[in-house]
Image (cartoon, rainbow, N blue to C red):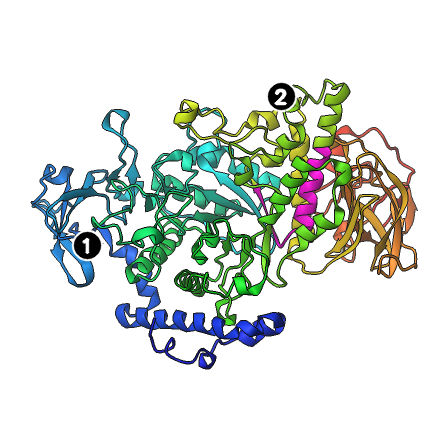
Amino acid sequence: MGGKYSSLNPMDVNVPNLEDFLKRDPYMKPYEKEIRRRYAVFLDYIDKINEYDGSLDKFTKSYQTYGIHILPNNNVRCYEWAPGAKALYLVGDFNNWNDTSHPYKKLDYGKWVLEINADDKGAAVLQHLSEVKIIIETEFGEKLFRLSPWAKYVVQPPECDGYVYKQRIWNPPKEEKYIFKHPKITKPKSLRIYECHVGIATSKPKVGTYLEFIENVLPRIVDLGYNAIQLMAIMEHAYYASFGYQVTNFFAASSRYGTPEELKKLIDVAHEKGLYVLLDVIHSHASKNVLDGLNQFDGTNSCFFHDGPKGDHPLWDSRLFNYSEYEVLRFLLSNLRFYIDEYNFDGFRFDGITSMIYHSRGVGQGFSGHYDEYFGLNVDTEAIVFLLLTNHLLHTHYSECITIAEDVSGMPGMCRPVCEGGIGFDYRLGMAIPDKWIELLKKYPDEEWNMGNIVHTLTNRRWMEKTVAYAESHDQALVGDKTIAFWLMDKEMYWHMSAVIPSEGDAALIIDRGIALHKMIRLITHSLGGEAYLNFMGNEFGHPEWLDFPRQGNNSSYHYARRQWNLVDDPLLKYKFLNNFDREMNHLEEKYGWLASNNVYVSLKHETDKVIAFERTDLLFVFNFHPSQSFTDYKIGVDSAGIYELLLDTDRIQFGGHSRLDCTVLHHTISEMWANRQNSLKLYLPSRSAAIYCRTCDKHEFIVGRVIKAMNANWHPRCFRCVLCSKELADLGFVKNQGRALCHECNAQEKAVGLGKYVCYRCQKLY
């Protein structure tokens, strides 16, 4: 760049906490010079912004000045950047589409401004919902219709009026503007993300709405125990089938789901329900649409994008931003602040990071993990510096903001702070994990699954760089692929998911295997794969089939562009079992917080027995992937001595299992080292099942008859249980029935156990 810092010897550039980064990973030392060079370019951009715009804060609030604005005095001010234009004009309903009556004034550096006074009655000449366009006059005298890059509201035209989206002024009366009622959410320590798409969130063959999502989907998400939602396809995209990844209007929330005020309400209600709200943001590329997109806005092929081949993505048929252009940085950084300040989004998931940071766009490139791949000439410094600016901005101005990178390359430092020489994200997506599960399901019979390879895939991540683990996302559900449930059970799901009519023969075996492995795959991914967890909408209950948006190739059908909630809501179908398990898994994580724990030890990967065991946050996780072999008195190593109890297992009846484990049995450790652990347990491991154990109270005191004593503050919350089913009562609430502590469910069905039983005073276990 040639700025003050870039001109220095990179080794003289101070990166405040770089030594911490290098100590954590000594293999980074040979690349220290390149890390410092990148940081120097970042500092030069900060200096440039401070010099030209006063501060990064002001620079990134440009959404308040750029575009079309109705001022408090009802004057209108329009401000655009169009460096390749000869002249600009504003046209619309307000001037009967007169293409010369309202010209912009040309300023320096390709800027254009237009000011329109209020009318004689003091009203703004641009009314709420009036249509406007910008005319770009090129140096060749050609006049082109365009939408403002900063347009806040863009709508699909009626079918009789073509396909080009229309910009409308969004300035509702004060009484119609949504006022936020609830504070934003503190970022969770254990992040459990529900990835969702408003348009397909309905079971009806249509586009769902923001208001329907509030009423029908948010309660499901909360019930399932997720604490964050990731909203996809919010930025306006003219082509619905692009899944929101061909953005045409970056500042316009998609109008096909409703109004901006209704989106604000959705986010506010999510906050009321304790949900952190992430926006799926696409700054890696943009739609090629010209008439209603960003492409060729000023009549040239550059403007916001690189000209020539560098400006076109070879696979996505889209335009690539020029991150070295000052005004492009203004546009994209302001875009992020706009969604936080205007809509109250909490954080962002950034799409297509790998495409951004390599000149190859990652196309046809395999990443071996050698550090030369991350610090060589193929790396796009301009994109790296844009991401440094992005994360610096967001984490400086919004302390609770979370940023997630979709990067498949494994770039070192992607999730370390900018001040360490990292790129600054909080999490990266564990993209190898879903690929591994699909590979196993497509290519290998259960007997050939490699336990060591599964564990390696789940744990192969950089130390102290957080990963979002997921068994499947929207990518695996798209047409041409299948969900995990459909890979497991395929067409048998159509006819054999009844919970009341037993299946027979091969169909019964297929469904039983599918339900068992679906739970096990999700649990081991959740508990071992990362520091956060993500699930795509509907996959928690094994949504069948695939996603396919209405398009010419399917006769514009919505059949596969919806979520069939009726399947999980039907008590006569087995989908409820998978849903029940997902709920219990998330609520258990909320209580014990294994995602927030870095203390993980895998003690067993037995290839013959198909058993995996590991400890995390004082819990013991045991998986038996063997398709037919169950094991009695199977020795498992644990570090902490004591008495272990069963917290959760995949084989329970309410999860569609066979109830082969007894949750009332306590397991005492043996003072015998096993698998490099100080102690060991002997457990029953049913085939195709998984279980979670924790240490319970190590001293039992028995009483006869009445089992309720005065609540003692010294009791551990886990030691207050229903005497029938052993459910923990501290969080669930309880009732007293003839002097016994019962959960509400057991109290309703109570008949099974009489008085006079032996009960542990501390943990309320029945003996």
Quadrant containing the N terminus is: bottom left
| Residue 385 in the figure: left or right of residue 564 | left
Q: Secondary structure at mark 2?
A: helix
Density class for disc 2 (Cα within 10 Å; few <14, some 14-19, many ≥20) is few
Q: How many marks?
A: 2
Q: Secondary structure at mark 1?
A: loop
Is residue 529 inside the magenta stretch?
Answer: yes
Which residue is painted at 49% across and 63% down in the image?
424
* 270 is within the stretch colored magenta: no
Which residue type does callout 2 highlight? Answer: Tyr
Residue 494 is tagged as 2
Q: Position of residue 535 (x, y in %)?
A: 58, 42
Vertical placement of 59 versus 242: above or below? below
Which residue is found at the position 89% from the left and 54% from the top? 669
Q: Residue at x 43, y 50 (%)?
A: 345
- The x, y position of residue 188, in whole percent, is 57, 54
**Marks 1 and 2 close (CB-CB < 8 Å):** no
Residue 182 place in picture, x, y as percent: 45, 49
The residue pinned by badge 1 equals: 84
Residue toward you, 399 or 137: 137
Depth-wise, is mark 1 or mark 2 nearer the camera? 1
Instruction: Looking at the picture, tell me which residue is in the foreground, 41 or 658.
Output: 41
In the image, the segment drawn in magenta is 515-535
Comparing 480 with 133, the one in front is 480
- Say if residue 348 shows up in the picture: no
Magenta stretch, overall SS: helix
Q: Is residue 203 above or below residue 423?
A: above
- Label 1 vs label 2: CA separation? 58 Å
Residue 685 makes an appearance in the image: yes
| First along the sequence among labels 1 and 2 | 1
Q: Position of residue 71 (x, y in %)?
A: 20, 52
Q: Is residue 312 left or right of residue 480?
A: left
